[in-house]
Amino acid sequence: MGSTRKAGRPKVPAADRILRAASEMFYREGIRAVGVDAIAAKADVTKKSLYDNFGSKDALIAAYLRARDERWRTWLLDTVDRQGGTAKERLLSTFDALAEWMKHENPRGCGFVNAAAELPHDGHPARAVVMDQKQWLRGYLAELAAEGGAADPESLAEQLMILHEGANVANSLDISANAAQRAREIASFLVTDLR
Amino acid sequence: MGSTRKAGRPKVPAADRILRAASEMFYREGIRAVGVDAIAAKADVTKKSLYDNFGSKDALIAAYLRARDERWRTWLLDTVDRQGGTAKERLLSTFDALAEWMKHENPRGCGFVNAAAELPHDGHPARAVVMDQKQWLRGYLAELAAEGGAADPESLAEQLMILHEGANVANSLDISANAAQRAREIASFLVTDLR
DNA sequence: CTGTTATTATACCGACCGGTATGTTTACTA
DNA sequence: TAGTAAACATACCGGTCGGTATAATAACAG
């Protein structure tokens, strides 16, 4: 069902093209390194359209992170559900999902951690998105941990978060060739007592 | 051009003030967010002095990271040596060193990881310093692992690196209240068979 | 058709960017 | 005391930053 309207012009709405261009450039080059003019040019859009749609660069940054967050959540949940199994197995599956994600979407580290590194001020709208992303994953892991009968699900979730974040960094800086796999090995120790 | 640097000077040399100011600002605000004018002003120095001493902003960034690297290495080695003990105990001590370091020098995450996030291009002089920092720590951990009789010291070092990096991120984004302690708990599992 | 909305094109704004040029002053040392 | 090198102060450079203004054009709903 392609929405092909009039072979000449906008197959994809301007807002979508802007967000797509911004996402690629922000992640690859760094947020502060990319100017709004460059984004508009790559999206084949005027700066006016960009500001009509998003209001400011800061809002566009937040939108970029929100979209990335949604893609990651979908990918993670789909992968875990697809592999199925017990709560213990699903906790370990999150590292398989991470491995694939890093391979083709995350070669330069976690986009949220990178954004937080570039935007240290608490007031920035992007930081709320970052914090939300992390707390969501932590909550999801805690849920699975509780389901598996963990003695302290929250503590286990924190430990698994450390492994996730560490794998991201180790992967992006060539510290480990298959960081997600290594993190998964460690995680398997932590969940041995679960069902 | 003989003696450029010689006998003791009563005041703190300009180069030191510049490097100190740059270090604080780069780490706290982010590298790209800080302009050379602001650094010169904070160091109470003219821009000319800054460029005479460091040549370019990129070189100053690399110098900032090199200085930070040296401080970290010194802190780590001193802490580990102070606590002493077996190789196994010293591997665990690296997490105690990290905990203290994060408390008063690293609240905003690993400065090297943050720098790599902001400067993605391989050609940038800062990236070499970052990579060197990570490889050094990995090598140090592998050394201790071998000393402790690890079956595969390199693999163990990679796993411990994941824990170090993960603790840094978890600490800076409030994912875990005592991330280094949690990472240490995990590490203690990994080194149980060592001496 | 007409009115509205989205989008285009272009030009502009003040502020700041990294970096340079010019001289003048300070401070150590030969 | 004279020489020298490092620090000073100031001003400038072209380029880019995020953001705005104005006006023309294209698409669509009534």
Image (spheres, coloured by chain):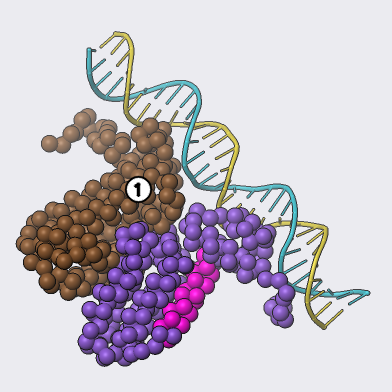
Chain colours: A brown, B purple, C yellow, D cyan
The answer to whether A161 appears left or right of B35 in the picture is left
Q: Which residues are drawn in magenta? A: B61-81
Which of B8 and B83 lies nearest the eye of the viewer?
Answer: B83
Would you say residue A117 sits in the magenta stretch? Answer: no
The spot of residue B86 in percent (x, y) is 33, 90
State whether residue A11 is above or below residue A26. above
How many labels, in total? 1
Asked whether residue A188 is in view, the answer is yes
Residue under the point 14% across and 60% down: A146
Q: Residues within 10 Å of mark 1 (few under 14, many from 20)?
A: some
Residue under the point 12% across and 36% down: A1
For residue B178, which quarter of the picture? bottom left
Residue under the point 42% across and 61% down: B108
| Quadrant of the frame with the C terminus of chain A | bottom left
For residue A137, which quarter of the picture? bottom left
State whether residue B2 is above or below residue A101. below
Hey, which residue is sitting farthest front in the picture?
A151
The answer to whether A116 appears left or right of D19 in the picture is left
Magenta: main secondary structure: helix
The answer to whether A83 appears left or right of B43 in the picture is left
Amino acid type indicated by mark 1? Ala
The spot of residue A69 in percent (x, y) is 26, 50
Asked whether residue B128 is in view, the answer is no
The spot of residue B195 in percent (x, y) is 27, 90
Would you say residue B69 sits in the magenta stretch? Answer: yes
Q: Mark 1 lies on which chain?
A: A
Element type at mark 1? helix
For residue B131, which quarter of the picture? bottom left
Residue under the point 24% across and 57% down: A138
Which of D29 and B113 lies nearest the eye of the viewer?
Answer: B113
Instruction: Say which residue label 1 marks.
Output: A128
